[in-house]
Image: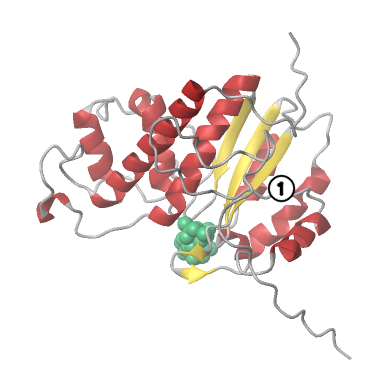
Amino acid sequence: MSDTRTPSDPPVLSDDELSALDAHWRAANYLAVGQIYLMANPLLTRPLVPEDIKPRLLGHWGTSPGLNLVHTHLNRVIKDRDLNALCVWGPGHGGPAVLANSWLEGSYSETYPDVGRDAEGMGLLFKQFSFPGGVPSHVAPETPGSIHEGGELGYSLAHAYGAAFDHPDLVVACVIGDGEAETGPLAASWHGNKFLDPVHDGAVLPILHLNGYKIANPTVLARIPEDELDRLLRGYGHDPCSSRATTRPPSTGHSPPPWTPPWTGSAPTSGPPARTARPSAPTGP
Ligand SMILES: Cc1ncc(C[n+]2csc(CCOP(=O)(O)OP(=O)(O)O)c2C)c(N)n1
Ligand SMILES: [Mg+2]
């Protein structure tokens, strides 16, 4: 039967599906935070002691839940619509989230059998992250399936467009950090849409991750009024949808994940307060 839904139709998900998505998201979050902080006691089977914690912490927890949410829902859409898709991850030091999902779905252990899908493997996954002799804090060439090295910010969207060229059946999602968006290469890459041929090339879905910060400093795109950002992106030829994560309801039972990808359904209406407007810049003499 053909799929007659339009992108604006809300997804119809059962309680079981919502519960599974929520569980996947929470598991990926645990795996991300564990990689950042723990070098022993991965399942917290005994009370934490200082020796369980890494002496030097790297990796951005603040970007990881957002990346995990996108990953969880992309998987849902890929399975639901049988998409041929890949995702390029831009946000700085979002490696723990990408590695967490790779390990959860099994690709990581296929490539690195010593990091198996059991407690011992989880312990290795945690310890090796950003650790001497281990793996970098960003997506690196050794990350299974990687086509994009995340260490130097700025190239995610250009790489996403490059991946879509000459692949008409491919959807390339690209998560762009709001800090990365301040680099010159990324700021120019919004124009990549001018080079996509709708017949011979695939589709690129840029996802701007407005978590408000580049490491610990405020970002420009998260501080300008939302309608100004909307107009900026429209000026580049994009058709932006905005979506806010909401706080999960207190019940942990069948609570839905707090985000719905804008291209698959309606965006939540509640969330953080809207950004306040600022006076427009002087226009000059
Ligand atoms: C070209 C370049 N400049 C600076 C850095 C150092 N750096 C690493 S992560 C980061 C912040 C990136 O911000 P964002 O993309 O919003 O990611 P988040 O902090 O939200 O994880 C910076 C400046 C870098 N990796 N590459
Ligand atoms: Mg950021």
Residue at figure coordinates x 44%, y 68% from the top left: 216
Tag 1: residue type? Cys
| Residue placed under numbered mark 1 in the picture | 241
Residue count near mark 1 (Cα–Cα under 10 Å), binned few <14, some 14–19, many ≥20:
few
Residue 65 at x, y percent in the picture: 44, 47
Q: Tell me: residue 74, above or below residue 127.
A: above
Is residue 170 in view from this perspective? yes
Q: How many marks?
A: 1
Left or right of residue 147, residue 99 in this image: left
Q: Is residue 56 left or right of residue 49?
A: right
Identify the coloring: secondary structure
State the residue at coordinates (64%, 23%).
83
Quarter occupied by residue 75: top right
Element carrying mark 1: loop
Location of the N terminus by quadrant is top right
Residue found at the far top of this picture = 1
Residue nearest the viewer, comparing 175 with 132: 175
Which of the 4 quarters of the picture holds residue 278?
Answer: bottom right
Would residue 196 be found to the left or right of residue 145 on screen?
Answer: right
Give percent across and percent down for residue 57: 28, 58
Q: Nearer the viewer, residue 206 or 4?
A: 4
Q: Which residue sits furthest bottom?
A: 285
Instruction: Report whether the residue tagged 1 is closer than 8 Å to ligand 2.
Output: no
x, y percent for residue 19 = 45, 28
Residue 80: give x, y in percent of width and height: 61, 21
